[in-house]
Structure formats: structure tokens, C-alpha cells
Image (spheres, rainbow, N blue to C red):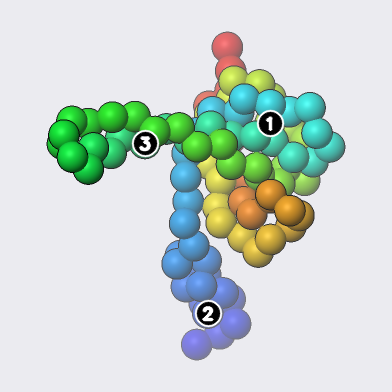
Amino acid sequence: MSDTEIASQERKRRKTREGLVVSTSMEKTVVVAVTERVSHARYFKTVQQTKKLYAHDEENDARLGDRVRVMETRPLSKKKRWRLVEIVERAR
């Protein structure tokens, strides 16, 4: 196997999430709100949980309201453990 094939297999093991950009006020960082539906532990009703992920945006091209895809990465700062992979849909 070549080095690129090994690197691509390693990338596939990383978690990816899709969410909405809720803040772009920091340099090279966006805050992404990821909503997931989970079953309640006791009552088994489906509830929505929202988590805010701090993601690295190298080019500062994500804007407020964009739907983006982020990928898990090494710790880049105290709270930043994700990086922007692509902008799925631009805000209207």
C-alpha cells in the first residue's frame, strides 16, 4: 500500500458531522451546531440534542447559517477538535 492509501484509510475512521454555523466571530474558527435525535433513556421518546462544536476554518469562508461538514482532528486549541471539510449548502 502506498502512503496516500494508508492516509485515506486513516481518515475514514474519523468522525464526521453535519451542522449549521452559528458563529463566525473568531479568526479561523467557526462554531457549528450539530443536532441529533436520540432515544430518551427512561421514557424512550425521541428527543433532539444540540451540541456546539468548535471547528477550524483555515480560509474563513464559512458564513453564518451555512450547512457544513466537519471532521474530527487532533486538538488544535482548548476547545477546538474539529476541522471544516466542506460547505454543503450556503445560507440564503
- Which residue is rendered at x = 59% and y = 41% of the image? 53
Residue appearing at x 53%, y 32% in the figure: 33
N-term-proximal mark, 2 vs 3:
2
Name the residue beneath numbered marker 1: 62
- Residue nearest the observer in this picture, 85 or 81: 81
Q: Is residue 67 left or right of residue 39?
A: right
Does residue 9 appear in the picture of this structure?
A: yes
State the image coordinates of residue 9 (x, y, percent, origin top left): 47, 73
Name the spot of residue 58 as percent of width and height, x first: 77, 46
Crowding at label 2, few (<14), some or many (≥20) Cα neighbours within 10 Å?
few
> Quarter of the image holding residue 36?
top left
4 sits to left or right of 18: right
User: Circle 1: is it few (<14), some (14-19), or many (20+) Cα within 10 Å?
Assistant: many
Q: Which residue is mark 2?
A: 6
Say what amino acid the circle numbered 3 marks.
Answer: Glu
Give the farthest residue toward the top. Answer: 92
Name the element at disc 1: loop
What kind of residue is marked 1?
Ala
